[in-house]
Amino acid sequence: MYVNAQPSAMNQEYVNKQRFILQVVIAGAFYPNYFTFGKCNEKSAVKELAGKDPKTTVMLKNIPPYGYLYHKQLQSQLRQCGQVKSIAYNGSKALVEFSRNPKEAFKVLPEVYLAIKMLQLKIPFELDVHDPDDIRKQLQGVAASSLESLRVNVDCQKQTVEPVEISFGALEMSEMIPSRFLSIKITEIVEVGHFWGYRIDEKNRTVLEALTAKINYQNLMDLSVPPRPDLLCLAPFAFVNNRGYYRACVLYVHGDFAEALEFKICKMRPSARSIVCGERWSYSASQRFASLVSGCTLLVHVYSVVHGVLHVDVFRYSRCKDLVNIRDVLIRECYAELAEEPYESQQSHDLLKEFLSDEVKKEKQVPVSSRQEEKHLIGRLLNCFSDNKSDAPTHKVKVSGPFSPYELKCYSLTRVSRFRNIFICKDSINSIVVHDTAEDPFQQLLVAADISVNAAGSVLFLGETSLMPPIPGLLALLSMLFAPAIELRVDKTGKYFTGVLCGLGCSQTSGAPLLPENDMAVAFDVQFGVEDITEINNLRTAINKLLCERAVYSGQDQMMELQENIRQKLLWTKLMKSYGIRVQKDVKSFSLYIKFESYVLPFLPQQTCAGWVLAKLTGNPRLIWELK
């Protein structure tokens, strides 16, 4: 394959397009070694993580009684993965949360992958523990049973160990969100739809002006202690060419990010075009978003609050003084597309509506029982059983994990592998896949260059794997693009395509399916029409022409022209343009292993590299397309 060594002016977008083209080439080279992932039960996963952020949190089980006494051992064993922010104990389960850099995009932290990798590599997690009877004796029977499985939160940055307060956070919520609509100004853009800012309503403006005036008259001194998370201080910050000292809260040890509120535009994800031209958001999408929101007052409508981040609709005033929805602009210009909100966001949305209703406002704050006694007893135990004061631990306990309920399992799309377990080789970069967008209904494709089987034939091992971009419909597009023969499936009404059966088709003489064990069935997760199938067929014809011409001619100029033609056809399909494509909800797979059926094909003139030819539309709701 010829690759242009002189990229165009949009250098990074060109590089990303080339990477996508190479991924498509890999998918064609190793067809039908196609695999995908099972769906994550988002509701169950949220419950298992007790509302913690799956992008920053891993779970450990088989925690011994009074597990919080050994939090330093746990923190020490996970330190090789990254900086531990907190450990939440709930009975025999511990949830370990790693620190997130607030200036980075929303994605699963490398620390989470490294922690789960420890389990895959069978690195033992063992704790040196004390006999529970010795601990109970130390308590002298005072609330011993309640402390044994008490819900405790260990803040590793503040170095505090406290019982979890059972609270609905009404006071904090009312301070953060006095109403559903807020006027804000943006001070830092992290990525498209993700930014930091502060409220500029009249009350906040008055307070901020008073604080700024007071700060300007102070004789400021350097910090007497090193910066640490949650430390309140004053920090230099430039905003609209004005540099001064602003109130700051250190949120991450590698920086002193000084913003008040974190926002994310709700019901939006990157379009296929943005993903192809960028790792997530393209350069042009980032520039367009910045031009829409920078340097002006914005109105946000709060949809939900998830892990301290406000999911919002963002509006700005147009020249005609009309409100313009930023998300609608990005979708109209094909930088983004509509998406469902995560389960946690939907739950928060319902709670927020209830919280802001008149009835709840009258209730004031929910009374919370005091935990001072429990806190005192925890401190007493920690003091008694610290490493330098207590007797030596009596035995070891093996802890299960770390793992994440959002980790996905891989399965094959071909008939021959449907009852086999699938394992991705440990040395593969894709050996662990954690789903950070469990709400997305579409399937993501994994292509394997090397496949081996165990002696019993029950397990497939995948090597040299490539994870395709998370683009709706890409799995179906690539399957139809590289399959020798396909049968399209339609719904009961015969109006919509629902899926496709890919394989070698039927024997022209006997009518029997050819190697049916390698047939592959794909349910459509986006709506495909006749126009889309025609585009894919034209692309297939262009690829065939390139291969045929390559066998006859070897001129580099002609090869470049043919390759560029294929690139443009691929990048400008309706699927890649993200225009008019609708994601199908509640995708139901048809009978996955229906065999190809034999039909009498009408006479067709011989054409070189004709791609698929429509053979016959039968009374059965099926279409046959064959390669001629």
Image (spheres, rainbow, N blue to C red):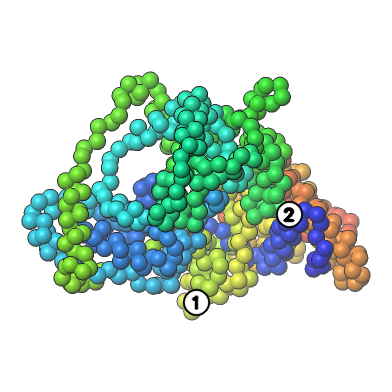
Amino acid residing under circle 1 = Asn
Drawn side of residue 321 relative to residue 155, left or right: right
In the rendered image, the vertical position of residue 308 relative to residue 84, given as above or below: above
Task: Pick whichever, 423 or 561, lies toward us.
Answer: 561
Amino acid residing under circle 2 = Glu
Residue 197: image location, x then y, percent: 54, 38
In the rendered image, the vertical position of residue 379 relative to residue 219, given as above or below: below
Query: Which residue sits at x=27%, y=42%?
Result: 165
Residue 366: image location, x then y, percent: 28, 31
Q: How far apart are marks 1 and 2 (CA)?
A: 42 Å
Drawn side of residue 471 relative to residue 380, left or right: right
- Identity of the residue furthest to the bottom in this view: 455
User: Residue 91's image quarter?
Assistant: bottom left
Q: Quadrant of the N terminus?
A: bottom right
Residue 512: image location, x then y, percent: 67, 63
Query: Which residue sits at x=52%, y=67%?
Result: 431
Residue 398: image location, x then y, percent: 29, 69
Per the image, the residue denoted by label 2 is: 13
Q: In which quarter of the image is the C terminus?
A: bottom right
As drawn, the label of residue 454 is 1
Mark 1 or mark 2, whichever is nearer to me? 2
Say whether disc 1 or disc 2 marks the residue closer to the N-terminus.
Answer: 2
Q: Circle 1 — which element? A: loop
Task: Pick whichever, 208 or 115, lies toward us.
Answer: 208
Instruction: Judge the density around disc 2: few (<14), some (14-19), many (≥20) Cα neighbours within 10 Å.
Output: many
User: Residue 392's image quarter?
Assistant: bottom left
Drawn side of residue 102 relative to residue 94, left or right: right
Q: Circle 2 — which element? A: helix
Task: Pick whichever, 58 or 560, lies toward us.
Answer: 58
Query: Which residue sits at x=20%, y=54%?
Result: 379
